[in-house]
Image (cartoon, rainbow, N blue to C red):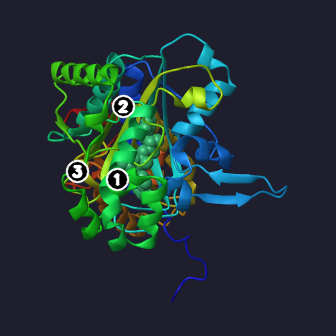
Amino acid sequence: MTPRFQAVKGTRDFFPPETERWAAADAVCREVFRAHGYGEVRTPILEHTELFARSVGETTDIVHKEMYTFPDRRGRSLTMRPENTAGVARAVIEKGVATGPMPLRLFYIGPQFRYERPQAGRFREFRQIGAELFGVPGPAGEAEILGMLFAFLRALGFVNLSVSINSVGTAETRSVFSEALRRHLAPAAGEFSEEDRRRLAENPLRLLESKDPAIRRRLEGAPTPREFLDEASRRHDVEVRQRLAEAGIPCEDQPSLVRGLDYYTRTVFEVVSRDLGAQDAILGGGRYDNLVESLGGPALPAVGFAIGEDRLLQVAPFRAPSRGFVLVLPQGTDELAAALAVADELRREAPGTSVEVDLLARGFKKGLSRASILFEEAAQRGYDRDRMFAALIGSDERAAGTVTWKSLATGEQETFARSELARRIGAGREA
Ligand code: HAM
């Protein structure tokens, strides 16, 4: 039967064990980022539409056709953020921190919204983990941000990733390059779709990512942004690569990389995993030295990245740390109070263990058959089989102040005093 209500296309529901894996990855992120001095920033999902037009760029695909934009009840145009860099830049200016002590190190984890055609690894609501470093104009900025990024990726178990890197120069050299690219592509425009002809006229850089064979053919031998770099950007680029090599961060030159957002200056980078579908980047980022000023703030250089967390978790070797699981089974309602007390004791003595009480007090037989189902589910969810137990409390146990402790892994059971619980669980943890 088709349910009457379904999730909106391109959005998804998550349940355990997935939510547990997400939460564990977020915890690793917070630990690594905090260890680098980054603090969490939370900005609203709703922003004024104009913010994205000004920052991401009016002629980009994101702004042109992927935003969830609507008038609010008073007719103001609002947009559900398609990315978080613009919101962070706005907040930094609005709160006055853009004129405060530098460098400023911020990170975020949260949902973003793009009206794209849903497919593998592409959703309309997706999550990004991102970081932004403000106030560092030199290559030390890229070195720190990419160093932290790789520390995180390595903590998730990745070993073979490398970052594709390029320089797009300044706003001026970018526009000279853009014009050269337009001239190179224009003679073949007759073979392009109407949409691509619009891109060619408005923002030819968008065509660099095209999959259309006619455009791909024409792109062979096309100019690259590197050829148009000014001297300072060229030096910056060389130094960035030196720093990354010194820091042991594997990177590959990608002369055609420009990225689909307009705010970048100089360094841009992406990480693509072969384990994802052909076109999909796990993350992207770069330097955006003009954005804060163009939004009405002070001249403030910045560099950052955002990881698509959905794609990241699809390919990360990372597993949530395994946990113990105990189901406390009162024989009947008379034993419920003792069972609840035992559960609380277990939660205190064995932090990290999940402890459930059979609140329906259905007796041992039903309780144990329910336990085996729960245990099986918990094992699927990555719980540690050797640390899964049923704690049985019958009238004898209640009277004697004991519990009967049954291991799921071995089926062995043993009755001991409740005062022994802490020691037993401790022993279980070491095993
Ligand atoms: P972006 O390349 O637009 O950059 O997005 C970053 C990452 O978000 C992508 O590499 C991808 O993994 C993920 N992503 C984007 N769209 C979707 C989607 N529809 N479904 C699933 N994942 C998606 C930015 O957003 C910039 N704000 C990055 C940045 C931060 N640059 C400087 N600081």
Find numbered disc 1 in the image and state the secondary structure of the residue it sits on. helix
Q: In front of the other: label 1 or label 2? A: 1
Q: Is residue 101 above or below residue 306?
A: above
**Helix or strand or loop: what does disc 2 sit on?**
loop
Asked if labels 2 and 1 touch by Cβ distance under 8 angstroms, the answer is no
Contact, CB < 8 Å: mark 2 with mark 3? Answer: no
First of labels 2, 3 by sequence position: 2
- In the rendering, which numbered label is found on residue 273? 3
Q: Which mark is residue 169?
A: 2
The residue that disc 1 covers is 183
Of callouts 1 and 3, which one flags the residue occurring earlier in the amino acid sequence? 1
**Residue located at (39% from left, 39% from top):** 176
Cα–Cα gap, marks 1 and 3: 33 Å
User: Quadrant of residue 178 in the image?
Assistant: top left
Q: Is residue 80 left or right of residue 77?
A: left
Q: Position of residue 18 (x, y in %)?
A: 38, 56
| Residue type at tag 1 | Arg
